[in-house]
Image (spheres, helix red, strand yellow):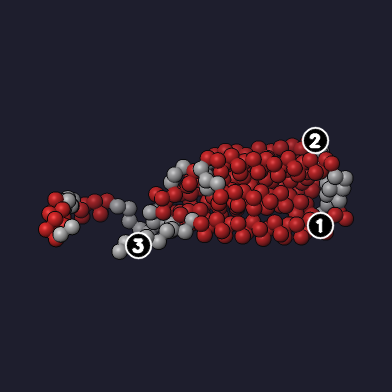
Amino acid sequence: MNGKIKMQLKEYFAAPEPRAKRRFMCSLPAGPVGLSDLLLFQAAFIPKWIWGLSAVIFALALVGAECLKKDMLWCISACMPLLALAPVTESGRSQRWNMAELEMSTRFSLKSVLLARLGILGLADLLLFFLLLPLARMNGGGSLLETGVYMLCPYMLTVLLGLWASRIVHGRECAYLCGAIALGVALGNALLYQTIEGFYARHNFSYWVPAFALLSLGAVKQCIETIKQKEEPVWNLR
């Protein structure tokens, strides 16, 4: 393409002069958007079913432990994978709704948005964990440390497998697969309690500690890999 044709194309596709530019710039909201604003914005976009599920699990644990006087440790442990399903599915929400490219072009990167959502859901799950911990121990007889490890093992396993699956499978299939993983871990936890005698016995606690450590390390690794996968692509504009 010679220079004459380039010049003609440049003149033909010339952008018009902006109108009322100063008035438009003055109409933009003043002041920077801080981290607290980002967290508030992202908290508003978290689906309401997540908060509803947490409330239902806490209500069932409260009724079972306080009113029915039942040992709720196995039941609460089986519900922990359902709580882990929330942050796992949120990690792939942008791709599922085809919003990843748009969020990459916003002021906060997609990684920042993802960290904000995971941080909010992680804090909510941590708060619920501390509320459920005394209820799970109430009629069980184990210590708080033992009860906490029993509850967190299925949670960490779900996070590990769910984040791994979300990095491989995208779209709505990812949500279905993560749901199947959480349900499988929950049912597996309940079945093991019913079939293995002394599943939560104190003499078996020495096996739970290294399992919890390995699952936690695996979950942290998968979380780091998921965040790295959200890195913005480097465009070559030359």
Q: Nearer the viewer, residue 201 or 231?
A: 231
Residue 125 appears in the figure? no
Q: Amino acid at mark 1?
A: Tyr
Q: Which residue is mark 3?
A: 236
Q: Nearer the viewer, mark 1 or mark 3?
A: 3
User: Hey, what amino acid is under mark 2?
Assistant: Leu
In percent of the image, x 48 and y 53: which residue is there? Answer: 113
The numbered dot on residue 186 is none
Mark 1 vs 3, N-terminal side = 1
Q: Is disc 1 placed on a helix, strand or loop? A: helix
The residue type indicated by label 3 comes to Asn
Q: What residue does disc 2 label? A: 68
Q: Which residue in the structure is indicated by mark 1? A: 207
Among the two numbered marks 1 and 2 on one chain, the one whose residue lies closer to the N terminus: 2
- Identify the residue shown where x is 81% and y is 39%: 70
Judge depth for marks 2 and 3 and give the one in front: 3
Is 40 located above or below residue 65 in the figure? below
40 displayed left or right of 155? left
Label 1 or label 2, whichever lies nearer to me, is: 1
